[in-house]
Image (cartoon, rainbow, N blue to C red):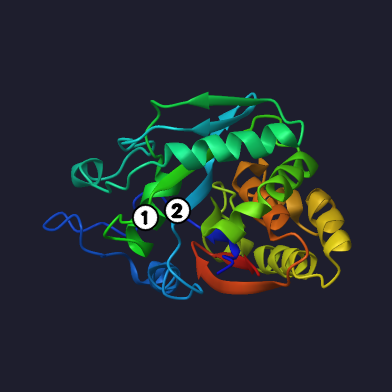
């Protein structure tokens, strides 16, 4: 069955796994529980279990779109200042070299220069939300980088080039945060965060696919855009997911509040 494409929030560092006595147990501050519960139901809410996943994380940028083709990636603990046990987490999902080759081919067919690599580990934009969503690590994963220029239209076009994978049992996931201003914590930014999130949701769920893509590509013209994203790397995975959604309907899939931020997830198809 055709898989949707998703844009999901990946939380803050290892926020869902803060129990030093049992690192694999879900244990987080209550403010993270709605997001955690959403992620925990991610796979069961699909039309069927995916054969593989293609994940685009906010935490990997390269000059060119780069495809991870490794067979057994390690984890990349690319967060700082958390308890020691959070640097011993495990999530042993296999790679999928065959899918990696297919991703590379589709992007090149769409005239994107593409690089390949096999050594980088899964960053926390992959393994933290997926450890919640798929604790058995039983679905193979391929990771695709962002392109360092962070061009929204290019990332939408790349997603569109990859849309055919959804008919092949591949779940396409953009992993980021719809609000990501680390200088803002607490209630002083709440109203501005809500205004931004409402404007973003209106653009992302526009019923006209061409207008949807144009509005989201011009994200920085939305109210409070640069307040929500002083740098937009955490929003760019949404562009890939939206492009992969093609002409399918879009919906707001989750909304919660953490750190005074309104944070949303989206589903296409």
Quarter containing the C terminus:
bottom right
The image quarter containing residue 188 is: bottom right
Q: Which mark is residue 242?
A: none
In percent of the image, x 42 and y 27: which residue is there? 118
In percent of the image, x 72 and y 53: which residue is there? 243
Q: Residue 52 carries which label?
A: 2
Q: Is mark 1 on a helix, strand or loop?
A: loop
Of 100 and 153, the residue lying toward us: 100
Q: How crowded is mark 2: few (under 14 residues within 10 Å), some or many (20 or more)?
A: many
Q: Left or right: 9 with respect to 132?
A: right
Of 138 and 128, the residue lying toward us: 138
The image quarter containing residue 247 is: bottom right
The picture places residue 140, in percent across and down from the top left corner, at: 38, 49
Quarter containing the N terminus:
bottom right
The picture places residue 151, in percent across and down from the top left corner, at: 76, 37
Q: Do the residues labelled 1 and 2 touch (CB within 8 Å)?
A: yes
The picture places residue 228, in percent across and down from the top left corner, at: 67, 53
Is there any visible trace of residue 185 in the rendered image?
no
Q: Left or right: 140 with respect to 184?
A: left
The answer to which of marks 1 and 2 sits earlier in the sequence is 2
Give the residue at the far left of this rendering: 21
Q: Residues within 10 Å of mark 1 (few under 14, many from 20)?
A: some
Of 5 and 78, the residue lying toward us: 5
Query: Disc 1 marks which residue?
Result: 139
Q: Left or right: 59 with respect to 108?
A: left
Is there any visible trace of residue 213 in the rendered image?
yes
């Amino acid at each position: 069955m055709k898989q949707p494409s998703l844009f999901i929030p990946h939380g803050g560092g290892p926020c869902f796994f803060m129990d030093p006595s049992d690192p694999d147990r879900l244990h987080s501050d209550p403010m993270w529980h709605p997001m955690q519960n959403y992620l925990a139901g991610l796979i069961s809410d699909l039309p069927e279990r995916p054969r593989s996943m293609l994940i685009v994380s906010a935490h990997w940028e390269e000059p060119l779109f780069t495809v991870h083709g490794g067979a057994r990636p390690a984890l990349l603990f690319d967060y700082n200042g958390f308890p020691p046990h959070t640097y011993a987490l495990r999530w042993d999902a296999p790679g999928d070299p065959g899918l990696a080759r297919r991703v590379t081919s589709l992007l090149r067919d769409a005239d994107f220069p593409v690089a390949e690599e096999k050594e980088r580990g899964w960053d926390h934009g992959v393994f933290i939300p997926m450890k919640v969503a798929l604790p058995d690590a039983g679905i193979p994963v391929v990771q695709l980088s962002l392109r360092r220029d962070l061009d929204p239209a290019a990332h939408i076009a790349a997603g569109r080039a990859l849309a055919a994978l959804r008919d092949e049992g591949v779940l396409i996931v953009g992993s980021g945060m719809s609000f990501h201003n680390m200088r803002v914590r607490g209630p002083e930014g709440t109203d501005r965060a809500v205004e931004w999130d409402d404007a973003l949701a209106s653009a992302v769920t526009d019923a006209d696919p061409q207008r949807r893509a144009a509005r989201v590509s011009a994200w920085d013209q939305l109210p409070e855009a640069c307040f929500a994203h002083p740098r937009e790397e955490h929003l760019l995975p949404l562009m890939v997911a939206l492009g992969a959604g093609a002409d399918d309907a879009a919906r707001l899939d989750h909304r919660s509040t953490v750190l005074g931020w309104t944070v949303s997830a989206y589903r296409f198809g």
